[in-house]
Image (cartoon, rainbow, N blue to C red):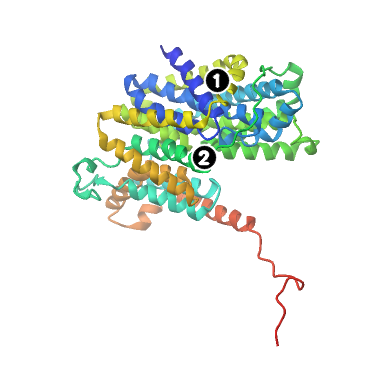
Amino acid sequence: MTFVLILFSLLWGIAFGAVPGLTGIVGVALLIPFTFAFDPIEGMLLLGGVYVGATFGGAISAILFNTPGSPEAACTALDGYPMAQKGQAGKALGFALAASAIGGIVGTLALMFLTPPLAKLALTFGPSEYFALAVLGITAIASIGGGSVLKGLIAGLLGLAVATVGMDPLTGVARYTFGNMLLLTGIGFVPAIIGIFALSEVAHRYGQGMKKQEVITNVSTDLPSIREFIQTRITLLRSSFIGTVIGVLPGVGATTAAFISYSEAVRWSRNPKKFGTGTPDGIAAPECANSAAVGGSMIPLLALGIPGSATTAVMIGGLTIHGIIPGPMLVQNNADLVYSVFIGMMLANVVMLFFGLRAARYFAIILRVPYPVVGAAIVVLCVSGVFALNNNMVEVAVMLAFGAVGLLLKRVGFPVAAFIIGLVLGPIVEVSLRQGLILTDYDLWAFASRPITLTLLIISFASLLYGFWGQFRSTPPNDPPSDENAEPVRA
């Protein structure tokens, strides 16, 4: 049964990754309500397989018609599509598939070896350390997640504010419920993430309008030869390391790993001008890095309870449905779950390597399906899945409300991922801050001066400064108008 679920999750993930605008986040969010029918191990492997499959699936549409199916595949299109235009679409898909499998295996190995010792270290954490760790997660995604740092920070703070709805965890006082008893338990996490990711994306796509594009579907995936593997070995090793390290950082994710890996491949290349013309290194670098980041982003989720990416933040919903709290005690209390995730993620990457050889051409056919049909199916899955959780229409209303919130955030340029990270980390921030202040008799210096706490807070502050500095440098100066364009001086 577990093997069947892994196969299904890979199919589901590749399909959602291949269709532009769906992404693995939506694929994971839609399946969360259905994990209630399985035990925790099967449910987590189902979500993990979607994450693995969607990361590779984005390369299919990027290579075949120059439109990345997911953000982490944006760099893949730079060399994948030119290679497809040369009549080498199968070869390009083969490089993407092999690089994704290699990066995924390396990231999973890091997940296996780093999670247990990191969880043991986290057992020494007190309330102040958990507060600083949560602050690091919010500031990291605000400063490195791209776009405006200020908007990212505001979105994270909005998520923290929404997390305070419900009963006070320490005093039991009702907050922001407006007399509605159903809100005493707080905002349902699963309805919120399904609404803010899946529903808002459908509405956003309909608002933009759909354009028909020519797609190459008559392809067969060809794995690279041993000689081609040897030629790209340095790129694969470097990208696997970059992807794993960046994946571990809270809130950064696979997209940043792909862009950094691609830029480093150009930097260290003997012939950088070949990038953008259809070189295998330009495909291997981002695909290997974004798949390695999958395993890396699972490390802080399982060991610390801090999501390493937006997708792992959504996966927390799958754990909470079964009453499991991710964090350092997870490795001790649910060792069978943790090690099953290790084995399942490794198996998913190996199966994807063999399964993708024949599957890519069939998944390309999905791109011919009109988006109105796909969007309607997603809405039906959203409503039925959320209602099936507790047979409660209030949760459906919460999902619809957060769908509108997600659409509004996208329209005004606020990152949705930062909002979700804030929503996930809100209870950790509030409870750990208040407990830590009580233990120190409200002495702020005693609270913040613990070695690990102070280090994490300094890193958080430095990441914000780095983000603001990078944004300042990327903003072009306002040059004064030249004499010929200047308004003539009047007497």
Q: Nearer the viewer, mark 1 or mark 2?
A: 1
The answer to whether residue 214 is left or right of residue 187 is right
Left or right position of 171 against 38: left
In percent of width and height, residue 126 lies at 35, 43
Q: Please give left or right for residue 91 compared with residue 309 in the image.
A: right
Front residue of 93 and 383 = 383
Answer with left or right where residue 284 lies relative to residue 194.
Answer: right
For numbered disc 2, what is the local secondary structure?
loop
Nearer the observer, 202 or 440: 202
Pointer 2 local density, CA inside 10 Å: few below 14, some 14–19, many at least 20: many
Please tell me whether residue 447 is drawn above or below residue 298 in the rendered image: below
In terms of depth relative to the viewer, which is nearer, 414 or 434? 414
Q: Which residue was labeled with disc 1? A: 349
x and y, in percent, of residue 339 in the image: 43, 20
Badge 1 element: helix
C-alpha separation, residue under disc 1 versus residue under disc 2: 22 Å
Which residue is denoted by mark 2 in the rendering?
249
Residue at (46% x, 42% y) in the render = 417
Q: Is residue 188 above or below residue 292?
A: below
Q: Quadrant of residue 104?
A: top right
Quarter of the image that includes the N terminus: top left
Tell me what residue is drawn at x 53 percent, y 53 percent: 148
Q: Earlier in the sequence, mark 1 or mark 2?
A: 2
- Residue 240 seen in the current view: no
Residue 284 in picture, x, y percent from top left:
67, 28
